[in-house]
Image (spheres, rainbow, N blue to C red):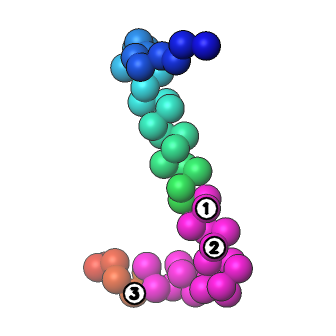
Amino acid sequence: MPTSDLAVMTIETYEKLVGKFELYKLLDEGMDALKMQKVRSFDEAFADIEKRTPE
């Protein structure tokens, strides 16, 4: 069975596809962080952001 070497799609379709791949990568990284217990609570993370934000 022959294989295709070329796919034609609109830029919108391509951007959606790439966006999905980026999302999957981030979700994978998050799952790895959970497994290694390298996470912190929302309150801790938000407090850290507030400290870095000028008033």
Pointer 2: what residue? 32
Kindly tell me whether residue 12 is visible in this rendering. Answer: no
Report the residue at 50% width, 32% height from top.
17
Give the amino acid type for the residue marked by disc 3 in the picture.
Lys
Mark 3 closeness class: few <14, some 14–19, many ≥20 residues within 10 Å? few
Relative image position of residue 38 (x, y in whole percent): 60, 86
Q: Nearer the viewer, residue 4 or 20?
A: 4
Q: CA distance from mark 3 to mark 2?
A: 27 Å
Q: Nearer the viewer, residue 7 or 51?
A: 7
Q: Is residue 19 above or below residue 10?
A: below
Q: Is residue 3 magenta?
A: no
Report the residue at 52% width, 18% height from top.
3
Left or right of 29, for residue 13: left
Report the residue at 53% width, 55% height from top.
25
Query: Which residues are the magenta region?
Result: 27-49
Image quarter (top left, top right, bottom left or bottom right) of the N terminus: top right
Circles 1, 2 touching at the beta carbon (< 8 Å): yes
Circles 3, 2 touching at the beta carbon (< 8 Å): no
Left or right of 27, for residue 18: left
Give the amino acid type for the residue marked by disc 2 in the picture.
Asp
Q: Is residue 44 magenta?
A: yes
Mark 1 closeness class: few <14, some 14–19, many ≥20 residues within 10 Å? few
Mark 2 closeness class: few <14, some 14–19, many ≥20 residues within 10 Å? few
